[in-house]
Amino acid sequence: MSTNYQDPIGWPFLPVPTNGRLTYPTLEQSVRDSLRIILMTRPGEQLMRPRYGAGLQNFLDEGNTVAMRSQIQTAILKNLQNYENRITVDAVDVDPVPGAPAQVQVQIHYRLLRTNVSQQIGVTMQVG
């Protein structure tokens, strides 16, 4: 009788054994995961850090206006500067998607401080 045990709960920040060895995420992958978490976490969602998170979900019911895109950009910049100290943010672009008035494209251009390698991450979100 051979059964493979699988943990019922997974945690993305802990190493997962592969072929009997522990593997850790690369710096690039760890930073990308952290950025996604910052973008998707709403302020007040974490108990001990009430200002943590850009809360992109909070902008889903807003209209696609210049003021709203500026608020998204400010929220992202502020949170990345406060909570991700492994990068330098070069630019945060929040632009309307051509031909889709209810969508916004967010592009974050950043450099890893340890290696000075340029990276970018983007997300398209539905608004209004």
Image: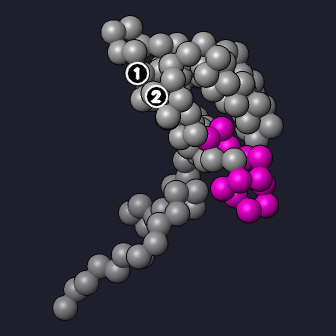
Amino acid type, label 2? Val
Percent x, y for residue 77?
Answer: 72, 26
* Magenta-drawn stretch contains 46: yes
Label 1 sits on residue:
102
Note whether 122 is above or below 56 in the view shown. above
Q: Is residue 93 above or below residue 16?
A: above
Q: Which residues are magenta?
A: 44-55
Mark 1: few, some, or many residues within 10 Å (few <14, many ≥20)? Answer: some
For label 2, the crowd category at 10 Å Cα-Cα, with few meaning under 14, some 14 to 19 and many 20 or more, is many
Magenta region includes residue 111? no
Spot occupied by residue 76 in the image (x, y as percentages of width and height): 67, 30
Q: Is residue 93 left or right of residue 96?
A: right
Q: Which residue is mark 2?
A: 127
- Along the line of sight, which residue is nearer the eye, 105 or 80? 105
Tell me, yes or no, whether the two marked residues, 2 and 1, touch with CB atoms within 8 Å: yes
Can residue 109 be seen?
no
Image: 81 above or below 100: below
Q: Locate residue 115 relative to residue 69 in the image: left or right.
A: right
The residue lying furthest to the left in this view is 1
